Amino acid sequence: MTCPICSRTSDPKYRPFCSRRCADVDLARWLNASYAIPGPEAEAESLPDDDENPRPPPRQ
Ligand SMILES: [Zn+2]
């Protein structure tokens, strides 16, 4: 299996990713998609406590 982010060989510790960094990249993409942030400027405004208390978006 290869890393979906950079296509290197994946590490069993971080599979399917090759490293923590690629796992973070994928997580960031997932979060961006979930919150549907219109632009980079809205990030700090709409996510005031994201660093301290990360959590999935509420179900609707
Ligand atoms: Zn990778």
Image (cartoon, helix red, strand yellow):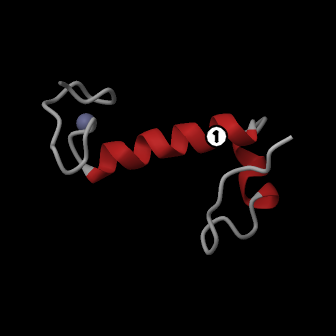
Q: In this view, does 44 lie above or below 26?
A: below
Q: Residue furthest bottom?
A: 52
Q: Which quadrant of the picture is home to ligand 1?
A: top left
Residue 52: image quadrant is bottom right
Residue drawn where x is 78% and y is 49% of the image: 42
- The quarter in which the N terminus is drawn is top left
Q: In this view, does 6 lie above or below 41?
A: above
Q: Which residue lies furthest to the right in this view?
A: 60
Q: Does the residue labelled 1 lie within 8 Å of ligand 1?
A: no
Judge left or right: residue 54 versus residue 21: right
Judge left or right: residue 60 versus residue 42: right
Residue 7 appears at what percent x and percent y?
Answer: 22, 24
**Residue matched to label 1:** 32
Q: Is mark 1 on a helix, strand or loop?
A: helix
Residue 44 appears at what percent x and percent y?
Answer: 73, 59
Residue 55 appears at what percent x and percent y?
Answer: 65, 60
